[in-house]
Image: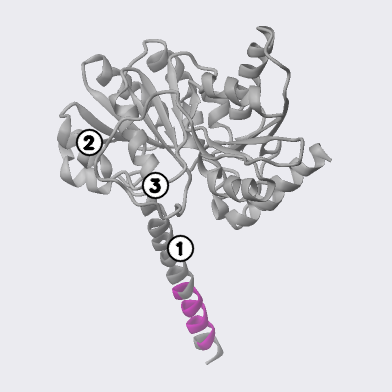
Amino acid sequence: MRLEKGRLAIIGLLRQAIADAVHRVQQRRVEGLVHDLAQLVDMAAQDERLIGITPAMCDGSGLNAFSEKYPNRYFDVGIAEQHALTFAAGMACDGLKPVVAIYSTFLQRAYDQLIHDIALQNLPVLLAIDRAGLVGADGPTHAGAFDLSFLRCIPNIMIMAPSDENECRQMLYTGFQYNGVAAVRYPRGGGTGAVVDQQMQAITIGTAEIKRHATASKNKQKIAILSFGSMLTVCLEAGEHLNATVVNMRFVKPIDHALLEKLSLDHTFIVTVEENSVMGGAGSAVMETLQTMQAHNKPLIRTLCLGLPDQFIEHGVHETMLADCGLNAEGIVAAIARQIT
């Protein structure tokens, strides 16, 4: 009798575990719908050269609709990231325009192929980089903490970071139209709820946009917060609190030199914010640009780079993880306040 009760208890626990696992998978699918690559269907309808490639990430990267609509133009190469990029390079050499849907953390495995097979030949390959930034419960093995750092040093590559769902759509279109290597990096999870424009329009390459202008203030400090990608919402909150200019940078490479020069002339403090390692990331690109300007007798300006720290971030709730890294509105305000007081 006891054995039977024990067996039933174990079966009950297993059923509950399976149900919980199914719920988590379904929840991830719902969260990922914001950045569903179903829009590749629209792009493929306009250009028969578009080819979709993924290393065993069809469901996770949202390629289901594309694979069903264009099965002969969809290739799942399995868990072989290096092959995915070399395969894309070969297709690009043959006149096709591949889109590689890949997680940021797994792109690391194909770094050599990206440099030697794609970038060196300046081939028209679009990298749709999912799971950029922290990934909550998936933990450090799946966190896309380094892609901006390891991508921006590669010649012949354009790098974009959208702030919302519509910008993601337009950047993917921009990258596909670009006659060279392009990367669009976007986070896992829900977006801002932006209305998605069904019409696809290319964004002018290397241009940022000012989302908030600082108003006249008795405070001698005039702050400009430069937001990269997913950080725009919290940067706008911080900007309201500090009466700061807030810029949606959009492009990590090429960076908007003209706007940076303008901001350096009429602001006293520039702050960069990114969901990427602060070492070698987008903030470093800004610092390098400002340094070049100063070499040409432009005025010196105070700077602060905020991003992910030099450590692996363990599992957790995404919002809490960002807060722990100082990448919520309160953390940004506090970091700036420490510098100007």
* Rendered image quadrant of residue 67: top left
Q: What secondary structure is marked by label 2?
A: helix
- In this view, the residue in front, 117 or 218, is 218
Q: Amino acid at mark 2?
A: Met
Q: Amino acid at mark 3?
A: Glu
- In this view, the residue in front, 88 or 214, is 214
Answer with mark 3 or mark 2, whichever residue precedes in sequence: 2
Q: Residue at x 26, y 48 (%)?
A: 64
Q: Amino acid at mark 1?
A: Arg
Q: Residue at x 38, y 59 (%)?
A: 30
Pointer 2 residue? 43
Q: Nearer the viewer, mark 3 or mark 2?
A: 3
- In this view, the residue in front, 333 or 322, is 333
Q: What secondary structure is marked by label 1?
A: helix
Q: CA distance from mark 1 to mark 2?
A: 31 Å
Pointer 1 residue? 24
Extreme residue toward the top, this view: 296
Q: What secondary structure is marked by label 3?
A: helix
Q: Which span is picked out in magenta?
A: 5-15
